[in-house]
């Protein structure tokens, strides 16, 4: 899923700079393959609203607690990429609503995984597997939520407290 972060924003920007839809079409082809087809069923679990890191972590792989494995930093990469893409592509881009739907689905899932101290764990569904504060994922989630609130895609009253909790945790413990 790190390829989503590395590739999608570049395709979005190239489409914007050149006005050629071929970049947005290619971006969708790569994204939808990763989302829906990679390794036979895709890396996005729409039911949980989160992404498996790669084919090695798609079930039957499980965390020690029996839950699916969702990597905080990797989900942060996708979340930030979706924010960046939605910021670049036009309102009438053919797959904008798909990206927005995934961003909203992820937002809800991410919000539910936040720790009491404001951070997220390395493993979003198993706090004891590589336990402890994960600053990269936390920063990426705060970035995406801040973008979503600022753009009006996320409800301010629901998500501002979540992202501020993350921000204050990072300032207090990581900076």
Image (cartoon, rainbow, N blue to C red):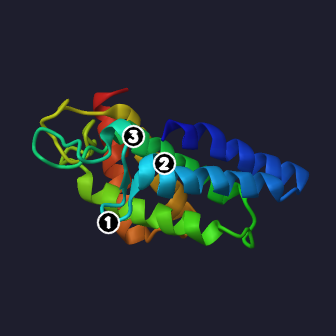
Please name the residue shown 17% across and 43% down the image.
126
Q: Nearer the viewer, residue 18 or 52?
A: 52
Q: Nearer the viewer, residue 69 or 86?
A: 69
**Closer to the eye: label 1 or 2:** 2
Kindly indicate the quadrant of the structure image that contains residue 156.
Answer: bottom left
Indicate the secondary structure of the residue bearing disc 3: helix
**How far apart are the alpha carbons under marks 1 and 2?**
17 Å
Please name the residue shown 25% across and 33% down the image.
133
38 horizontally vs 11: left or right: left
Instruction: Say whether residue 46 is visible.
Output: yes
Report the residue marked by disc 2: 38
Q: Which mark is residue 47?
A: 1
16 horizontally vs 82: left or right: right
Q: Position of residue 96 (x, y in %)?
A: 64, 67
N-terminal-most mark, 3 or 1: 1
**How far apart are the alpha carbons under marks 3 and 1?**
18 Å
Q: Which mark is residue 39?
A: none
Please name the residue shown 55% across and 70% down the image.
152
């Amino acid at each position: 899923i790190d390829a989503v972060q590395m590739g999608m924003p570049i395709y979005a920007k190239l489409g914007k700079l050149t006005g050629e839809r071929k970049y947005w079409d290619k971006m969708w082809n790569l994204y939808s393959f990763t989302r829906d087809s990679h390794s036979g069923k895709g890396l996005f679990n729409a039911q949980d609203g989160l992404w498996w890191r790669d084919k090695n972590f798609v079930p039957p792989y499980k965390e020690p607690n029996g839950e699916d494995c969702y990597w905080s930093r990797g989900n942060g990469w996708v979340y930030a990429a979706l924010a960046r893409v939605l910021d670049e592509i036009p309102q009438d881009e053919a797959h904008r609503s798909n990206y927005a739907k995934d961003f909203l689905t992820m937002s809800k899932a991410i919000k539910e995984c936040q720790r009491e101290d404001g951070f997220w764990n390395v493993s979003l569904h198993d706090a004891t597997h590589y336990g402890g504060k994960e600053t990269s994922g936390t920063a990426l989630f705060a970035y995406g939520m801040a973008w979503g609130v600022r753009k009006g895609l996320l409800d301010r009253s629901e998500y501002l407290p979540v992202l501020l909790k993350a921000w204050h945790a990072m300032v207090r413990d990581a900076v």
